[in-house]
Amino acid sequence: MELCFGWFLLVASIPAIFAQDISHGSIVVDGTMTVAQTDDNFVCATIDWWPHDKCNYDQCPWHYTSVMNLNLSHPFLAKAIQAFNRLRIRVGGSLQDQVLYDVGNLKSPCHPFQKMKDGLFGFSKGCLHMERWDELNRFFKETGAMVTFGLNALHGRHKIKRSLWGGDWDSSNAQDFMKYTISKGYQIDSWEFGNELSGNGIGAHVHADQYGKDLVNLRKIINELYKGSQSKPSLVAPGGFYDEEWFVKLLQTSGFGVIDVMSHHMYNLGAGVDPRLVSKILNPDHLNKAAYTFGNLTHIIRRHGPWTSAWVGESGGAYNSGGAHVSNTFVNSFWYLDQLGMASKYHTKVYCRQTLIGGNYGLLNATTFVPNPDYYSGLLWHRLMGKVVLNVESHASPFLRSYAHCSKGRAGVTLLVINLSNQTNFIMNAQNSINLKLAANEQNISRDSFTHSLKKTFSWVGTKASDNALLREEYHLTPKDGYLRSQTMVLNGIPLELTSTGDIPSLNPARVNVKSPITISPLSIAFIVFPNFEAPACG
């Protein structure tokens, strides 16, 4: 009876064994040449202005995470930022162009945002008290945050028709606010002008020639206010969706040296209510579409504004607060990390995630402040991926995405490998382009000696490698219990959860013999660190 039952289990397991495909291939990294460079603080997150009664699709996921009322004393919040050891935070969002600053000669009453039927985005103007600005800056200093602040680019303008606004920007309130900020010694890394007013805008838009004229004025103000200062903030604009004609005209109108950074927004997954969000995230063809925007912006900067650099000033994947039960789960990291990799290749210096906290797409849960899976994805990128981007090629499958950077703060190279397939195990060998001739000679080895070939290939990571037992570091990311919409990320088999004192858990790698093949399980992500990879581009 026991023999029959055992035979039944064996037969029953055969379909499961063969249901998963195995694909062998190579990943070739060229460490001889720099493809692009990011900023040291490439990973960025936003704090938005949306109040708790901002709602979409019968959901109100923002709670109390606004610039105005976010609980800055929550211990999880400070620890989450401090774990980055300098996280760039962008203060901005849709309502920033309706923000007044309670300083100087402001004659309007200082009230919070309120629901208003005919207001832009359904809200009235709001006002930032300087007491709150003081609190925010104390918090930024304590956590070591690097601050980008978005100014109110609609102040003083009037609506001409539909969503078009005209007239000169009234800079007086912003100038008084900047003076106050300087007088208090608050460190602002960059001032951004406006939010989503480019092209046809979102809710409102301003013609590019007018926008450029206002930026010239803002540049003069910054130069004057920071005269003699050792650190002058950068001027970032326009913080809107890419429109080639509008962006080109803005550069031409503003002229040489006015704009330091061209910032644009991306929500390439569509509306947060779209039932196809998960299928889009796992579709390599859909992910590739973002390259068009990145490539075009790179082209116009080279041609019309080589003194500027590109930022993604805001990106949450799915717009209108993100997708419930998608944007705050493991599956979203496939999109997030892939876009960090793609943006880097196209000379993007900074990538700001919408949001640090708030909406469905927050890196932190809006009520508990507990990190969502994407928080750990961003933190691992920040700690492992250096600013020098390398070329990497793999023809194993379009469902296997790979990116390579010089490792951060150490010698060697770090690979990011993303497996979008739900059934293919990829067994990959890493090759250094320096040794491709040697690799070509090895191609004549028979299929029967494949394992031997893999082991020899791994000794080619560089001429510094030897037959000694060199180790690489692996960080394999999977969802808890294999559930793609899990809100718990698993690192090398261990669920990532805050410690009993609310600290970010240790992100420990598995150390693997460098000669062994890399196995990337279906629907998983891995960072692979090669400390002995010979890459002249890494210095």
Image (cartoon, rainbow, N blue to C red):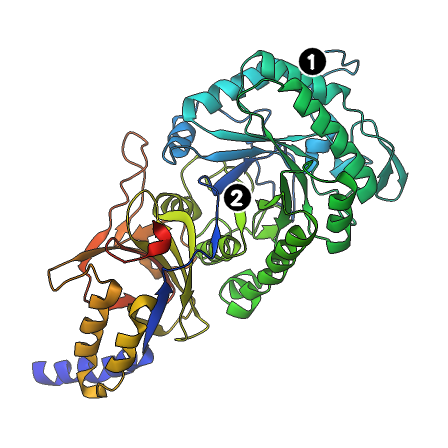
Side of 229 relative to 117 (left or right):
left
Q: Nearer the viewer, mark 1 or mark 2?
A: 2
Q: Secondary structure at mark 1?
A: loop
**Which residue is drawn at the image coordinates 59% and 17% (left, top)?**
228
Mark number for residue 194? none
Q: Quadrant of the N terminus?
A: bottom left
Side of 189 relative to 254 (left or right):
left
**Which residue is drawn at the image coordinates 53% and 52% (left, top)?**
347
Badge 1: residue crowd in 10 Å (few <14, some 14–19, many ≥20): some
Kind of residue at badge 1: Val
Badge 2: residue crowd in 10 Å (few <14, some 14–19, many ≥20): many
Q: According to the image, label 1 marks what residue?
A: 103
Kind of residue at badge 2: Val
Mark number for residue 350? 2
Res. 59 in view: yes
**Which residue is drawn at the image coordinates 50% and 40% (left, top)?**
44
Percent of width and height locating residue 471: 18, 56
Side of 513 relative to 533 (left or right):
left
From this viewpoint, which residue is outermost toward the right?
160
Q: Nearer the viewer, residue 352 or 117?
A: 352
